[in-house]
Image (cartoon, rainbow, N blue to C red):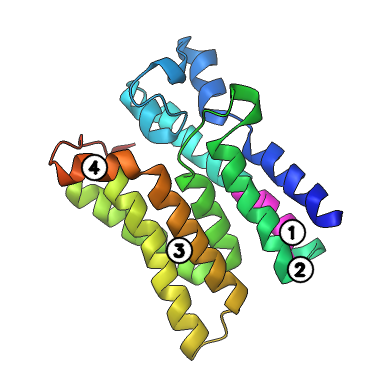
Amino acid sequence: MLLLILCLIGCLIGSIPTGFLIVKHFNGIDLRDFGSNSTGATNVLRAGDKKLAFFTLFFDSLKGIIFTIFIKYFFPESINLIAVFCCILGHTYPVWLKFKGGKGVATSAGIFLVLSPLYGFISIVVWALVAKLLKISSIASLILSASFVTLCSYGVLFSNTKFDVFIFSICSFLFLTFTHLDNIKRIMNKDESQTTLTKI
């Protein structure tokens, strides 16, 4: 019962539609009817506002950070990482917006920072470098998650990374790959648009 309640809280926190609310308030645009129809920071950038994209990225990450800290320090059992994963699900399928949200990247990045500050930071640096070099947000996002998996696997074998964090990293990678399937198809067809958040 406790896990179910925590999962529900995670979903509700993740469901806070920061990008949608910010752009709707300042620009009067419904992100669900614009660009990729996503409420994430990349689509906010497509709407033409770098500052709003930055704030969206920040607050989407903050959702993951706050909830993961809450779980980590008050409910540290390994199984409660399921509730943390629900925060990503809530961001992608927000109950307030008929389950049409972002792709879970920024929220995942915030969670990574709390679960493993060093590996999370390195993964975000890799994301920023790839985004700047390739100028394709989707590729950078997938590499962010893949980097965290790789680092966590190293940590399990040679350091003190907990195995449940490694499993979480794999689940996050698989889920982010799923949310980017359309992007992957466009990448394979060499039709993916160049959008980078590093210029925000």
Of labels 2 and 4, earlier in sequence is 2
Q: Are marks 2 and 3 in contact (CB under 8 Å)?
A: no
- The spot of residue 152 in percent (x, y) is 47, 75
Within-10-Å neighbours for mark 4: few <14, some 14–19, many 20+: few
Q: Indicate yes or no whether the magenta region holds residue 67.
A: yes
Within-10-Å neighbours for mark 1: few <14, some 14–19, many 20+: some
Look at label 1 and name its amino acid.
Ile
Q: Residue at position x 33%, y 44% from top?
A: 181
Distance between the Cα atoms at labels 3 and 1? 20 Å
Distance between the Cα atoms at labels 1 and 2? 6 Å
Look at discs 3 and 1 and give the one toward the viewer. 1
Q: Is residue 193 something that shows in the picture?
A: yes
Residue assigned mark 4: 185
Residue assigned mark 3: 121
Of labels 3 and 4, earlier in sequence is 3
Distance between the Cα atoms at labels 2 and 4? 39 Å
Of labels 4 and 1, earlier in sequence is 1
Look at discs 2 and 3 and give the one toward the viewer. 2
Image quarter where the N terminus lies is bottom right
As drawn, is 33 to the left or to the right of 10? Answer: left
Residue assigned mark 1: 71
Look at discs 4 and 1 and give the one toward the viewer. 4
Q: Is residue 197 something that shows in the picture?
A: no
User: Residue 5 versus residue 132: which sits nearer the camera?
Assistant: 5
- The spot of residue 19 in percent (x, y) is 51, 28
Q: Are marks 1 and 2 in contact (CB under 8 Å)?
A: yes
Look at label 2 and name its amino acid.
Pro
Residue assigned mark 2: 76
